[in-house]
Image (cartoon, rainbow, N blue to C red):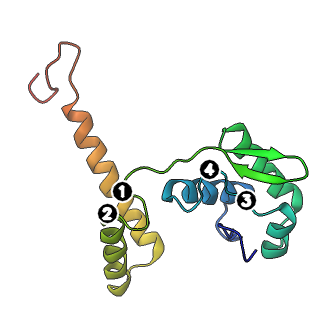
Amino acid sequence: MEGDVVEYRIDRGSGVPAYVQIVEQTERALRMGTLKVGDKLPTAKEVVAATAINPNTVLRAYRDLEQAGLVELRRGLGTFVTRSLARPGAEDDSPLRREITDWTARARAAGLERADIVALVTAALDAYDNKQDTRAPDDRGRKKEDA
């Protein structure tokens, strides 16, 4: 898969089905801007060779991505990205991306494992979202805190 933009890695011990891992990794690449509209996904044969999973698993993932409107299957040509999920700030050269990369390096240096880092980020997102929810206006247009 040398020329391909994305390389799938399947974690057999995760409990997450392989096709879901492919979908999630593709969506992540679309969000990060690694995959762009017009890019070709690896063929099922290439993914099978790299991951040793069943070809039908790859095809199921690609069908799910197609149903989500993210890719288009072109018979005889391959599977191509039709929509991006990238947002400003996620690009390789963005300040936010550099900050999170630096923070992740510090977290790893402090001995945190991947699951610890994911838990920290998830907790921070949950706390932020909960804080935003309490500030949403109620039916009368007042902040919930003021009601």
Residue with the mark numbered 2: 96
Residue count near mark 1 (Cα–Cα under 10 Å), binned few <14, some 14–19, many ≥20:
few
Q: Mark 1 touching mark 2, by CB under 8 A?
A: yes
Q: Earlier in the sequence, mark 1 or mark 2?
A: 1
Q: Earlier in the sequence, mark 4 or mark 2?
A: 4
Residue with the mark numbered 1: 89
Q: Nearer the viewer, mark 4 or mark 2?
A: 4
| Quarter of image, res 107 | bottom left
Report how far apart the C-alphas of labels 2 and 3 lie in the structure. 27 Å
Circle 2: element type: helix
Q: Position of residue 92 (x, y in %)?
A: 43, 67
Report how far apart the C-alphas of labels 4 and 3 lie in the structure. 11 Å
Circle 1: element type: loop
Q: Residue furthest left?
A: 146
Residue with the mark numbered 4: 37
**Is residue 61 among the parts visible in the rendering?**
no
**Is residue 50 among the parts visible in the rendering?**
yes
Circle 3: element type: loop
Q: Residue at x 88, y 60 (%)?
A: 55
Q: Is residue 51 above or below residue 78?
A: below
Q: Residue at x 31, y 74 (%)?
A: 103
Which of 107/101 is in front? 101
Would residue 103 be found to the left or right of residue 23 on screen?
A: left
Q: Residue at x 14, y 26 (%)?
A: 143
Residue count near mark 3 (Cα–Cα under 10 Å), binned few <14, some 14–19, many ≥20:
many
Q: Which image quadrant: the N terminus? A: bottom right
Report how far apart the C-alphas of labels 4 and 1 lie in the structure. 18 Å
